[in-house]
Every structure is written in C-alpha cells, then in structure tokens.
Amino acid sequence: MAPLVPDIISNEFNFVIAILIGIAFGYILEQAGFSSSKKLVGLFYGYDFTVLRVFFTAGITAMMGVIGLAHYGLLDLNIIYVNPTFLRSAIVGGLIMGLGFVIGGFCPGTSICAASIGKIDAMIFVAGIIPGVYLFAEGYPYLEHFYMADAWGYVTLFQVMGISQGLMAFLMIFAAVAAFVVTTFVEKRVNGKANPEFLPAKKYFALAGAAVLIGLTAFALPERQSYVMANAEVNENINTTAAKKISADELAFRIMNDINSFRIYDLRTKEEFTKLSLPNSENIQLNYFFGKDAAKNLKKDNVINIIISLREDESIKANYIAAENGYNEMYILQGGLQGFNDSIINFTSPRIPQTRWERDTYSFREAAKTKIPGIIENFKKQNRSETKKTKRIIGGC
C-alpha cells in the first residue's frame, strides 16, 4: 500500500483503504470539535487550544510511525511526498491562510467537515473558496515568479537545522508537551476556570512522561538509509559481506544464449547508461535497495541479479547495501563494466593462443565481440532497458 515496502495491499484495494481512512479522518475531526468555527478560532483568542493539541498529537503520532517503519525497512522514504519549500511564498501564504482562518472561522479542510454536517457558515466558506481558487489560477502567470522564489527543494526541518532525525523527533515531542502545559495555563487565565473536559492533572503528568519516553526511543531508531549509506563508506564494513562475482565471459554467454536468466542493475550516471547499456539493465542509484521497487524485483525466481558499475569497487559497496536490506543473493560484475568492455566489447587478442583454454576463450570472445553489440542495439530499439518505477507519492495538506 502506497509507500509501504512490502506490497501487502494491492493498488486496487488502495482506493477502498483511502475511502475508509477518509471517513475515519472526517469522523475524528468532527468529534474533536473541528466543525465548530467558535472552537477553531479559539486558538487565536486564547480560550480554546483544541486545534493545537489535536494537530500536535496527530503530527507526533505520524512522525514516530514513519521513523519506526523506516528504521525496520517497511517504509520507502524515497517515494513519500515532501512539500517543496518556496520560502517567500510560504511566509506570505501562511499569513493569508491565518488571516482567512480567523476571519472565516475555518480552514479548507475543516470547512468541508462542517459543511458535510449542515453548518451554513461552513457552506458559505466553501462557496467562497471556489472563486478564490479560480482567481489564483487565472493570476498565476503573474504570480509565478514570486510563488517560485527562494526554492529550497524537498527539504526537512532536521536537514535545514543540521541535526539528527532522532534529536528532531525528541525536540518536537518536548515542544508538544511544553505547548500543552502552557496552553492549559493560558486557557485557565482567559476563561477564569479550568476546562471541565480535562482529566485529573496526575493523568496528564503520566501521559507527558510517556510522551518523553517515546521521544527518547527515536534516538534508538536512527534514519536507517543514512546510517547504512554511511557505513558503506567504510571499507572494514563492506569487506564483511562476501560478494558473489560473475565474470565478463559468463555474462557474455548469458547475453548470447540465456538472456532471460539475469537482470542487471547499473549504478553509472544516467548519461553513461544512455550511451551504452547492456540488455535487461536498469539504471539505479544506491538508495534503490531501500525501496519497494527492490522488494518487487530482486526476489524473482530463476533470475540472477547482477550489480554493475564502471569499476568493481562501487559494485562492492552496493552489494553491502543490498545485503543490509536482506538481498543476499546479488552478484557483482568482476572488473566492472570497464573490464567487460576490455574483455568482450573491445576484445583484442593479446597474443597467439598457446593453450587449448586460451584458444577456446579467445574464440568465444571474438564471437561475443561480434554478436553482443547487435543484441544491445536490438534491445535499445525495443526499449527493453526502460523499467517502470514507482513514483514519489503526490499529496499532502
């Protein structure tokens, strides 16, 4: 389902799950009081901070879920949608959003929630959204330069701050607990009495303690992809993983005689791959082995998976990363693609063969040198080297 690495739910059933999640989300919003404009704007006037508490709780729950699932290799972070940051328009848009919220009493999501249960003010708010969207769309060509200014890309807060994911998670949970305490005090001062909906204070102290403990667990669940990639840069680590090797001659034989028996994962740049790619090749980066595409493709029966790069050392690093993700049956091309080119594609007999082994080997390589370029060209014409890849999930609020 979506960015989950194991495909435990089919694409078709995703829509059913989405409908059920949408119903549950709407129900929780309504039950939390988000259909009431009075409760929503209470955040701005200081008499009701339900909005802050609900969104902090939802955000922290989702954050810890993502951290835990990613750490255990169950979530493909590479295809999770991260809103691109355009700093200037984000600041101005936030001000406009906040102003519209406090004047109208709703945000777009809560207005739909309230309108669905018959709130007339919410219906008017939704009706006002339509011409607003239309005017923005018509005026976008004039606003585009400002809208796209200060582009930071798909960044996360802990990357911008230069801290670890675990520390960021702990700080967010600590900030949430502090915000809950401060807003409770503010509510009591503004309303002149404690909120009757609250439980006894002792229970909240227990919940706060549990939240802080959960935050501490984030340090024990480091961002797995960064952790493994960093370890792959240390030779002592990658040498602990035995690498199965396939020779240039064996690969050439398979290309000519058993082309469906292998799949190649090419680590070179896109430009190099486009210039020359072997049959049954897919151009990948090292983070490929953390994703759901690897989970679908690397465990097929009767197919050997071969990692190639220009030189063998990059393939050894990739083999370590693959093994860390549970793919222990990978092969690497001995000598890399440079060795394959020298031994097969551009083969030149170094001397007159002296032994039967040399005669057979040189004869095979001469035949491969003649046949394989034609096979490569044929595959290129058929676009057999193009593979459909899972795209980044588009969404967000």
Image (tube, rainbow, N blue to C red):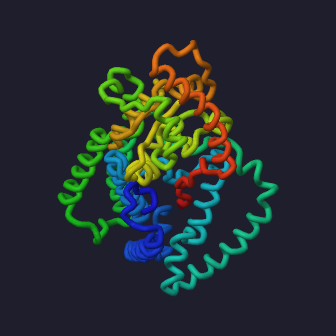
At x 33%, y 21%, the residue is 236
Please state which of residues 177 and 351 is positioned toward the viewer in this rendering: 351
Camera sees residue 227: no
Quarter placement of the C terminus: bottom right
Camera sees residue 240: yes
Point out the residue furthest to the right here: 142
Please state which of residues 228 and 189 is positioned toward the viewer in this rendering: 228
Whole-percent x, y for residue 359 in the image: 51, 22
Whole-percent x, y for residue 54 in the image: 39, 63
Determine which quarter of the picture holds residue 14.
bottom left
At x 48%, y 27%, the residue is 314
Point out the residue furthest to the bottom here: 118
Relative to 119, residue 315 above or below: above
Whole-percent x, y for residue 377 in the image: 67, 43
At x 61%, y 37%, the residue is 372
Relative to 326, residue 353 above or below: above
At x 51%, y 72%, the residue is 110
Q: Is residue 107 left or right of residue 232?
A: right
Relative to 225, residue 198 above or below: below
Q: Is residue 184 left or right of residue 93?
A: left
Whole-percent x, y for residue 198 in the image: 27, 67
